Image: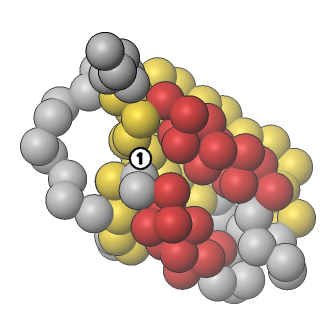
């Protein structure tokens, strides 16, 4: 019998040079490849915030991606907070405002 993988949700705030480097659009591409749902957005503070939801191994891979970012980014800090999963809330991963 195959064990069902746990779905997990993280709220992530990424600091550093993360705006003006297409961070959000690279994040959408990475999330789609990993079958992650949720969203990503710029904050007025200059940070990027993401809500990441998916099966635990893929969610961890997305967190690893967020810690690195796209080629022109320079990530200096990542704050991760686990949140309760609300199944069915998201159908995909999008840029939000």
**How many C-alpha atoms fall within 10 Å of the one at disc 1: few (<14), some, or many (≥20)?**
many
Lateral position of residue 81 relative to residue 3, left or right: right
Outermost residue, left direction?
A: 88
* Image: 14 above or below 12: below
Lateral position of residue 63 relative to residue 51, left or right: right
- In this rendered view, identify the residue nearer to me: 89 or 32: 32
Find residue 2 and report its horizontal and vertical position in percent: 34, 21
* Image: 80 above or below 61: above
* Image: 56 above or below 64: above
Lateral position of residue 91 relative to residue 92, left or right: left
**Does residue 92 appear anywhere in the picture?**
yes
What colour scheme was applied to this rendering of the protein?
secondary structure
**Residue at figure coordinates x 50%, y 57% from the top left:** 34
Element class at badge 1: strand
Instruction: State the residue position of label 1.
Output: 51
* Image: 35 above or below 88: below
**Residue at figure coordinates x 73%, y 45% from the top left:** 64
In the picture, the quarter occupied by the N terminus is: top left
- In this rendered view, identify the residue nearer to me: 76 or 54: 54
In the picture, the quarter occupied by the C terminus is: bottom left
**Residue at figure coordinates x 28%, y 63% from the top left:** 92
Find residue 94 and report its horizontal and vertical position in percent: 35, 70
**Does residue 12 appear anywhere in the picture?**
no
Find residue 8 and report its horizontal and vertical position in percent: 39, 28
């Amino acid at each position: 019998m195959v064990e069902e993988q746990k779905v997990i949700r993280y709220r992530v705030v990424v600091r550093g040079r993360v705006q003006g480097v297409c961070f959000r659009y690279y994040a959408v591409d990475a999330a789609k490849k990993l079958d992650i749902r949720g969203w990503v957005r710029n904050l007025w503070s200059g940070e990027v915030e993401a809500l990441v939801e998916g099966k635990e191994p893929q969610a961890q891979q997305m967190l690893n991606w967020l810690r690195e970012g796209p080629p022109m980014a320079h990530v200096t800090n990542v704050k991760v907070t686990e949140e309760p999963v609300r199944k069915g809330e998201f159908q995909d991963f999008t840029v939000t405002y």
